[in-house]
Image: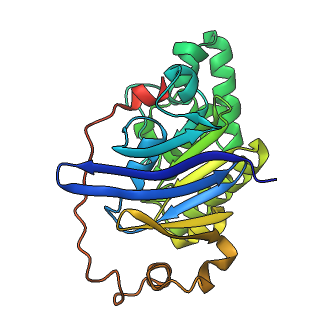
Amino acid sequence: IFLRMITLSGVHKTFGTNAVLRGVDLSVAKGESMVVIGGSGTGKSVLIKSVLGLVKPDAGTITVDGKDVNKGDRDAFLARFGMLFQGAALFDSLPVWQNVAFRLLRGSLKKPKDQARAIAIEKLRRVGLGSDVADRLPAELSGGMQKRVGLARAIAAEPEIIFFDEPTTGLDPIMAGVINDLIREIVTEMGATAVTITHDMTSVRAIADKVAMLHAGKIRWTGPVGDMDASGDPYVDQFIHGRATGPIAAVRYTKFQPPFLTLARLLH
């Protein structure tokens, strides 16, 4: 039975004269791992922020579990999500365990400090980090360890839906493989719905149940990851094989950064 967790219908979003999303239609089933691929500046991050209600579409509808993302209790809505940010995006001044337990120390999910610390240490263990890491500062960790801390934070509150923003950026191939395997294992264990945006085709093949390609503001193709190589779409074919020539070559993207949205606002 196909139970839709996230549905976008005819979603448009323009910033000034830059039409970023031009009628996006996409459905993500409950418990499914969807990976969105596409060139830089095609609107992948805007799509995720729109689902979170941090960017409001100009037209179209977005629902999560059948409910409009821009209506209802915002705190309760955001509590359903976890997110692994590009570059981990840890708070430099907080020790690792407080980074992991950030949501558990404040807001609607607040727990006693000792309990929050215990949960943080357990989640660190789940991503392969010992309790000795808990009281270190992020600057004392390698890039791969920081990414693991970010993953531990993403799952600390047992979210139903997890977003992964370029989860292997800046990592060497071995550590990228470790992170990919952890993401796949954890999403499966939790039964979570996952949406990942990435340029890394190794990640796509390791993480995805289904793949969607965003190009020129629309979803050009979507299907099971096993069908991707035989999609028959020239844009998908060029992108997944990294070819310099093809229909995407003539397009010049302008990377648009929407107004700054604080990390604390999403994690609260």
Task: Determine the residue located farthest toward the bottom in the rendered image.
Answer: 245
Q: Is residue 149 visible?
A: no
Count of numbered circles in the view: 0
Quadrant of the rendered structure where residue 42 is? bottom left
Question: What is the basis of the colouring in this image?
Answer: rainbow
Q: Nearer the viewer, residue 210 or 141?
A: 210
Percent position (x, y) of residue 151? 58, 43
Residue lying at 60% horizontally and 54% vertically, measured from the top left = 27
Residue lying at 54% horizontally and 23% vertically, measured from the top left = 103
- In the rendered view, tell whether residue 193 sits above or below residue 253: above
Q: Nearer the viewer, residue 168 or 226?
A: 226
Q: Is residue 205 visible?
A: yes
Task: Determine the residue located farthest toward the right in the rendered image.
Answer: 1
Percent position (x, y) of residue 244? 34, 87
Task: Determine the residue located farthest toward the left in the rendered image.
Answer: 17
Q: Nearer the viewer, residue 257 or 147?
A: 257
Percent position (x, y) of residue 11? 42, 51
- In the rendered view, tell whether residue 203 sits above or below residue 28: below
Quadrant of the rendered structure where residue 131 is? top right
Judge from the rendering whether residue 36 lies leftward or rightward of residue 265; answer left or right.
right
Percent position (x, y) of residue 176? 55, 62
Residue lying at 46% horizontally and 31% vertically, measured from the top left = 70
- In the rendered view, tell whether residue 74 sits above or below residue 41: above
